[in-house]
Image: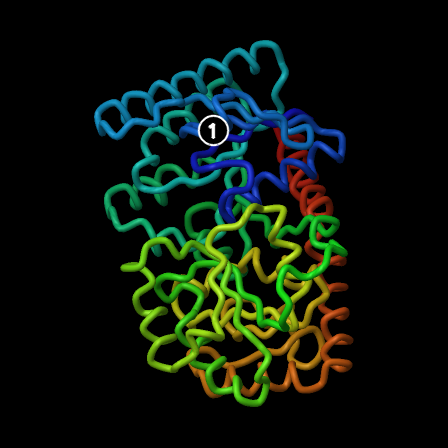
Amino acid sequence: MNFIFVSTGSYPDVHAAAIRQSVLAKGLVELGHGVRFLVLTPQDWAGKKKLDYFGVQFEELNSYKGSNKILKHYYYLKSVLKTKKILKQQATEKKIDAMMVFSIMSIHTIPIDYLVKKAKSYKIKVFHERTELPYVFDINKRMLHIYQHKMLPRFDGIFVISDKLITYLKQFNPALKKLLTVVDLAFFSTTKPSPYPFPYVGYCGNISGNKDGVPVLIEAFAKIKDRFPDLKLVLVGNNNNKTAIKETLDAISRLGITDRVVFTGLVEREMMPVILCNASILVVAKPDNELNSGNFPIKIGEYLATGVPIVVTSVGEIPLFVKDGETGFLSVPDNADAFAIKMEEALADPERSKAIGLAGKKVAQTLFDYKIQAGIMADYIAEQIKQQ
């Protein structure tokens, strides 16, 4: 089959959502399908308009990188019209089997809905993916209403990442298919040596705010630091905005662990498996909130793929795949004392933890392999096409 993917954001591997979508597209290509990925926002491709990513053909349809809001809107709308033209041409030439739409926020609702309606008028099957509850980020109630009551029912199928999303979205469209998180297992099988001369607890993700519970993680680390005097905490993520990460910095200072915490800042994607695979344990203390209740973090899949023991919190669908003492170490959320106990348990018995880490890796190999999930996506789309 031939697919056109449509999205906004930075590709192919700048943020978690882009990684998921790019790896799914890569999986489809490796399974023998064609993927043309149209991006409606400016990209950092060294001046290139097109990019080949493991056979996935990425195309930048909007190159405006200025700050003028009117021009931003103008060039974005131009990219929408370019996409419409491509869809019409591909449909006329019978070179497209389905269109996949990602990343719909409030600002994109009406333009993307226009594209969806046009695609349907060209007899193209249109699909969508949702990995988070739509009302968590969409604060524009009018656009959210249009998205939920007008746009969602138009899709021929919607891929979701959690049972909670199925429960929530089925009121708008019953054509739902669960698609788990995806991991490129080979990418996380590096044998390169550790970048640090000391043992460390590894974390990657959002350092600011409380999306990943970094303040709880820091407090938990402070509680175990004396038992493991050589151990450090390595935080991988954007730490340039000191105002945004003030809570994190204040906690480190207050707890007196400044010399035990390493900020890497943003690192090249290729460096990520090197840092993760050489950690003593990998951690994320996600809080129990609405944001985390309907998703499954890609970092959990990537953590598991390394074979390094992981310590995580029991939120959302994480407990479905991380079994305490079997495939990882599971802590109650929002509790630094409890998280510290699980970290200490994982660190105190390296042999047991190694076995648990390898069991976690088997979960990733069995369930999260990107080609497995891409195959599920392709099979579902093929079924929907047959119903024409």
Residue drawn at (51%, 18%) of the image: 87
Compared with 99, 311 (above or below) is below
> 332 left or right of 254?
right
**Which percent across, then down, holds residue 268?**
56, 46
Looking at the image, how many numbered discs can be counted on the residues? 1
303 left or right of 103 in image: right
Image location of residue 84, percent across then percent down: 44, 18
Q: Is residue 260 above or below residue 131?
A: below
The type of residue carrying mark 1 is: Val
Residue 178 or 388: which is nearer the viewer? 178
Dot 1 surroundings within 10 Å: few (below 14), some, or many (20 or more)?
many
Q: Which quadrant would residue 1 be assigned to in this image?
A: top right
User: In the rendered image, which quarter contains the C terminus?
Assistant: top right
Which residue is painted at 30% across and 45% down in the image?
A: 144
Figure check: 375 above or below 305 = above
Above or below, comparing residue 163 to residue 13 in the picture: below
Provide the residue designation for mark 1: 39
For label 1, the SS is strand
Taking the spot 55% from the left edge, 54% from the top edge, the residue there is 161
Measured as percent of width and height from the top left, residue 276 is found at: 63, 61
Instruction: Give x and y (percent) for residue 14.
Output: 50, 43
